[in-house]
Image (cartoon, helix red, strand yellow):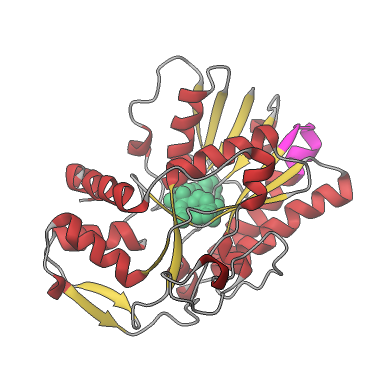
């Protein structure tokens, strides 16, 4: 199977390229990536050297390049994006360009080339926010996003991702294109650019800098190990039904404060490094993901246990100072 994967020099993309090459010997991957600030060729160091991987430096918004790369591909795994909510609040235009226009350029080229499947990688943030519930509350009292939850994105980032998802699903409805959308909760793991919560707090703590926690630190996220999401994306590629959306989550709801304290504990650093800073505008209070459909149809469940995997992630940043430094 010949794949065009976009955004493969980023956090999830680079973990996914490695996952695919290791677990699917028959797969060939062409990675189209613009190498923005978030893309790093170092993330792909040490891939199996057997000719199954190729890198194409370029922009998903360029129709000519995308058309050329699409020739002979069996499927598209679309991950390239502007991905940081805070940056989208500062300047929304690059998010609309890459996440909306770029997705449309890829869809049009995939349709023209007759690729068998287009997999749109998206986020639970498109559903908006849930009312706050203590993560310690029993399961029955913790409502979650299902695939049927109406889209209600609240940041320019999540709005642009929702638009990309809707375009992808429209290509299915309008042209009968084989499209699958996957929506993951907050990922963590190695190679995540240190602007996102876990690597930011880890690297600040390692440098002995104050850790800036937004608001009261009680915003709740569901955390999923990147390796679990990679397994989910592959399962959706191989077994998902055309035109369907699948949610993936880590079954690990935590407040931001719990996460940051967990990082300090893993590093043996004092809690007086914590500082509370003014909240992000429109900061969604809680996300939680129901992944029953992915379990039932794809046989997928998250395998990682949060505390252990957080420890492994923190250890990776300790051991790879050169990468983030
Ligand atoms: P990332 O920011 O780490 O990587 C994005 C990659 O896309 C980078 O390599 C960048 O160079 C590339 N890119 C950006 N604009 C491009 C363009 N115009 N053309 C080609 N390449 C371009 O992002 P990530 O965290 O790995 O997220 C990957 C995907 O998964 C995104 O679509 C994101 O919305 C989605 N997602 C992320 C999370 C998460 O927690 N990180 C959770 C669910 C879904």
The correct choice, above or below, for 104 with respect to 153 in the image is: above
Residues shaded magenta:
108-117
Quadrant the N terminus occupies: top right
Picture coordinates of residue 140, whole percent (x, y): 57, 68
Place residue 151 in its image quadrant. Answer: bottom right
The correct choice, above or below, for 58 with respect to 61 in the image is: above
Picture coordinates of residue 324, whole percent (x, y): 24, 50
Question: What's the magenta bit mostly, secondary-structure-wise?
Answer: helix
The correct choice, above or below, for 247 with respect to 231 in the image is: below
114 in magenta: yes
Q: Residue at x 65, y 36 (%)?
A: 237
Camera-side residue: 115 or 179?
179
Camera-side residue: 105 or 12?
12
Picture coordinates of residue 217, whole percent (x, y): 34, 77
121 in magenta: no
Residue placed furthest toward the bottom: 278
On the picture, is 138 further left or further right than 271? Answer: right
């Amino acid at each position: 199977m010949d794949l065009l994967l976009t955004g493969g020099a980023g956090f999830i993309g680079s973990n996914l390229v490695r996952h695919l090459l290791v677990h699917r010997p028959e797969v060939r991957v062409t990675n189209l990536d613009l190498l923005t600030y978030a893309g790093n060729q170092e993330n792909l160091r040490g891939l199996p050297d057997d000719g199954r991987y190729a890198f194409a430096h370029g922009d998903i918004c360029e129709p000519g390049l995308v058309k050329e790369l699409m020739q002979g591909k069996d499927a598209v795994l679309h991950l390239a994006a502007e991905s940081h909510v805070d940056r989208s609040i500062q300047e929304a235009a690059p998010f609309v360009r890459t996440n909306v226009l770029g997705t449309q350029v890829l869809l049009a080229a995939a349709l023209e080339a007759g690729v068998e499947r287009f997999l749109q990688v998206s986020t639970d943030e498109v559903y908006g926010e849930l009312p706050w519930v203590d993560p310690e509350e029993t399961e029955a009292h913790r409502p979650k996003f299902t695939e049927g939850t109406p889209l209600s994105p609240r940041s320019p980032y999540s709005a642009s991702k929702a638009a990309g998802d809707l375009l992808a699903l429209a290509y299915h409805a309008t042209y009968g294109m084989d499209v699958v959308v996957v929506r993951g909760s907050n990922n963590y793991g190695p190679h995540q650019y240190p602007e996102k919560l876990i690597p930011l707090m880890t690297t600040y703590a390692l440098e002995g800098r104050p850790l800036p926690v937004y608001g009261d630190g009680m915003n709740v996220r569901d955390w999923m190990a990147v390796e679990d999401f990679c397994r989910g994306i592959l399962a959706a590629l191989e077994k998902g039904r055309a035109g369907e959306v699948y949610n993936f989550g880590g079954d690990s709801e935590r407040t931001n404060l719990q996460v940051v304290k967990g990082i300090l504990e893993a590093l043996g650093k004092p809690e007086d490094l914590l500082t509370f800073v003014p909240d992000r505008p429109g900061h969604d209070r809680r996300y939680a993901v129901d992944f029953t459909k992915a379990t039932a149809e794809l046989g997928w469940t998250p395998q990682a246990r949060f505390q252990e995997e957080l420890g492994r992630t923190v250890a990776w940043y300790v051991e790879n100072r050169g990468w983030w430094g």
